[in-house]
Image (cartoon, rainbow, N blue to C red):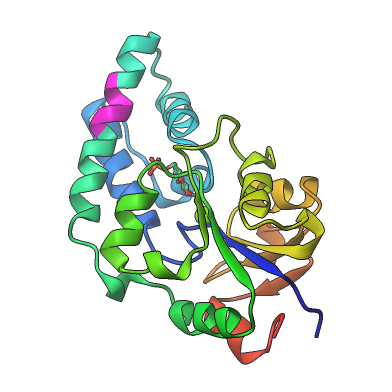
């Protein structure tokens, strides 16, 4: 099997199942603004920054607002989301996450986070998985959202590696596109979804447990 020197993991939908909490918090805001927001609509927000997510939500509800109002709504959604995060624990980790992180670590592979979330530090600490990461790049350290490759290029740099020596694990199309633009190997983590929704990846797994069982990069 092909070897790598670095592994860069997206957070939401790859290591942990937080999409349902994002969904509930956005839905609460949508309902307050007088329209409904379906789980199918929520798919459009995966991998997308908070600000962009709000714009997509407001488009769905055909709601217009100035920047000041938008930032208040984004803050309100985040406060609701953070209430869910405070109750998060390691049972929210997706199947096989810590096994695969342990295996890669034992193989000498350096590990970075590459997430759009500004809540990544809180989530990592709630899940008690900080220790697995040699670098953490998240929404607090980047200026350009996926599909721009900035988050993953910073991850590779922080690990002291070339992009081509790293594999990126992603559940969103924007993330797969960012990895390929950055010159990295892209692994689509499809979960219960279909790989047709994630075109362009080099490998596909259902979960990190499957990556472990199939010996991906091991
Ligand atoms: C991504 C999620 O990981 O983080 C998106 O897939 C989310 O749905 C984005 O909008 C930003 O997250 P946060 O926690 O900063 O609002
Ligand atoms: Mg994701």
Left or right of 213? Residue 133 is: left
Percent across and percent down for residue 136 are 49, 53
Residue 74: say if magenta: yes
Question: Where does the magenta region start and end?
Answer: 72-76
Is residue 83 visible in this depiction of the protein?
Answer: yes
| Magenta residues, dominant SS class | helix
Percent across and percent down for residue 135 are 52, 56
Please tell me in which quadrant of the rendered image residue 95 appears. Answer: bottom left
At 72% from the left edge and 70% from the top edge, which residue is drawn? 5
* Residue with the most extreme front position: 160
Left or right of 213? Residue 2 is: right
Q: Is residue 158 above or below residue 217?
A: above
Please tell me in which quadrant of the rendered image residue 163 appears. Answer: bottom right
Q: Is residue 82 above or below residue 69?
A: below
Percent across and percent down for residue 143 are 56, 29
Percent across and percent down for residue 48 are 52, 40
Residue nearest the observer in this picture, 69 or 43: 69
Picture quadrant of ligand 1: top left
Quarter of the rendering occupied by the C terminus: bottom right
At 47% from the left edge and 77% from the top edge, which residue is drawn? 97
At 29% from the left edge and 73% from the top edge, which residue is drawn? 90
Q: Is residue 134 above or below residue 172?
A: below
Q: Is residue 105 above or below residue 176?
A: below
Residue 9: say if magenta: no
Residue nearest the observer in this picture, 171 or 163: 163
Quarter of the rendering occupied by the N terminus: bottom right
């Amino acid at each position: 099997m092909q070897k790598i020197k670095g592994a860069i993991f997206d957070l939401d939908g790859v290591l942990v199942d937080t999409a349902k909490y994002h969904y509930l918090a956005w839905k609460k805001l949508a309902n307050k603004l007088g329209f409904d927001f379906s789980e199918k609509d929520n798919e459009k927000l995966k991998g997308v920054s908070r600000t962009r997510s709000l714009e997509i939500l407001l488009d769905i509800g055909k709601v217009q607002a100035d920047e000041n109002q938008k930032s208040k709504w984004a803050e309100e959604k985040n406060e609701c989301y953070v209430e869910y995060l405070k109750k998060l624990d390691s049972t929210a980790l997706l199947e096989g996450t810590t096994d695969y992180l342990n295996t890669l670590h034992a193989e000498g592979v350096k590990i970075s986070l590459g997430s759009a979330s500004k809540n990544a530090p809180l989530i990592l600490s709630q899940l008690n998985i900080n220790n697995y990461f040699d670098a953490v790049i998240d929404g607090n350290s980047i200026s350009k959202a996926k599909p721009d490759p900035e988050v993953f290029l910073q991850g590779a740099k922080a690990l002291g590696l070339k992009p081509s020596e790293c594999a990126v694990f992603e559940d969103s199309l924007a993330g797969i596109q960012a990895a390929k633009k950055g010159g990295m190997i892209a692994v689509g983590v499809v979960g219960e979804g279909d790989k047709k929704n994630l075109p362009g990846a080099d490998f596909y797994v259902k979960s990190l447990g499957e990556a472990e069982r199939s010996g991906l990069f091991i």
